[in-house]
Image (cartoon, grey):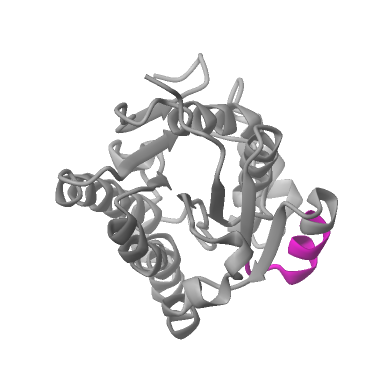
């Protein structure tokens, strides 16, 4: 069986630490990329670095009206979308016991990590079904399947992503579309500093309590592995942990 050829990838959260690593890995493998992120400045700089193989699209995935028109916002030169990578997510206000946290923070986490991911997928999947081709990669977390105290909203959002991915895979089982879930463990990305609203001291204290953490490139290699499989092979789920975690 032949391996999948390079194609066009649409990735959300493209300008963040994990997103940049995934983009770098895939561009290096010959893929073209539609970069979706809400940070316009970071997005523009990233696209300039890549050049003609990148199209930047400033978008907050909680903006339902714009997300529903997502495919319309992609130029014809970057269609069709062969691979969708749902990477955008955050934990702003997280790592707080549920009864002490802000209801607005919890709602925003769910709105981005789960509802936004579902809407982005809904915007892209019909064209994949029409073409009977495509690959959806959802970046979830070990929180999807493990209880971690003080992360109620984040873990709930990722558990939702897990079940959404499993169910979507079942619904698309009679098509040639592949659906993959990644469950990374602790990774050195900017999700921690944004969780603490830019407090670098809290970010350092958080990482200092662990012996080691994954690098974004470690997760990016797993994405590349999943999408590079022959068309008849579907990597359903990958959990990635530092060696000192279990």
Depicted 41 relative to depicted 141: above or below: below
Q: Indicate the position of residue 178 as horizontal and vertical percent values.
A: 32, 41
Task: Pick the residue in front: 100 or 56.
Answer: 56
Q: Indicate the position of residue 46 as horizontal and vertical percent values.
A: 78, 55
Residue drawn at point x = 52 percent, y = 34 percent: 5
If the image is split into quadrants, where does the N terminus sit? top left
Magenta part of the chain:
37-46
Depicted 41 relative to depicted 235: above or below: below
Question: Taking the image as drawn, is residue 148 in sight?
Answer: no
In the image, residue 195 lies in the stretch drawn in magenta: no
Q: Indicate the position of residue 173 as horizontal and vertical percent values.
A: 17, 43
44 vs 83, left or right, is right
| Number of numbered labels in the structure image | 0
Residue 208 occupies quadrant: top right
Residue drawn at point x = 48 percent, y = 71 percent: 71
Task: Please identify the dominant SS of the magenta region.
Answer: helix
Residue drawn at point x = 53 percent, y = 31 percent: 224
Task: Pick the residue in front: 236 or 76.
Answer: 76
- Name the outermost residue toward the top: 243
Residue drawn at point x = 22 percent, y = 45 percent: 169
Question: Taking the image as drawn, is residue 140 in sight?
Answer: yes
Q: Indicate the position of residue 207 as horizontal and vertical percent values.
A: 64, 34
If the image is split into quadrants, where does the C terminus sit? top left
Task: Pick the residue in front: 239 or 181.
Answer: 181
Task: Pick the residue in front: 75 or 67.
Answer: 75
Residue 182 occupies quadrant: top left
Residue 56 occupies quadrant: bottom right
């Amino acid at each position: 069986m032949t391996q999948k050829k390079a194609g066009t990838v649409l990735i959300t959260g493209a300008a963040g630490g994990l997103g940049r690593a995934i983009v770098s890995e895939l561009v290096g493998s010959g893929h073209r990329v539609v970069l979706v992120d809400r940070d316009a400045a970071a997005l523009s700089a990233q696209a300039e670095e890549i050049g003609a193989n990148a199209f930047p699209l400033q978008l907050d995935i909680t903006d339902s009206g714009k997300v529903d028109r997502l495919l319309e916002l992609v130029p014809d030169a970057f269609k069709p979308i062969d691979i969708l990578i749902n990477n955008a997510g955050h934990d702003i206000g997280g790592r707080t016991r549920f009864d002490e946290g802000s209801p607005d923070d919890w709602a925003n986490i769910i709105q981005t990590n789960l509802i936004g991911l579902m809407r982005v997928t809904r915007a892209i999947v019909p064209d994949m079904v029409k073409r009977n081709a495509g690959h959806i990669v959802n970046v979830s977390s070990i929180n999807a399947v493990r209880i971690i105290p003080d992360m109620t909203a984040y873990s709930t959002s990722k558990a939702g992503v897990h079940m959404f991915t499993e169910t979507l895979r079942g619904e698309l089982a009679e098509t040639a579309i592949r659906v993959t879930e990644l469950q990374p463990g602790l990774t050195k990305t900017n999700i921690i500093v944004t969780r603490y609203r830019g407090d670098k001291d809290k970010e350092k204290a958080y990482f200092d309590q662990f012996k080691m953490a994954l690098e974004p490139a470690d997760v990016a290699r797993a994405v590349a592995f999943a999408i590079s499989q022959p068309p008849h092979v579907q990597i359903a789920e990958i959990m990635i942990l530092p060696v000192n975690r279990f």
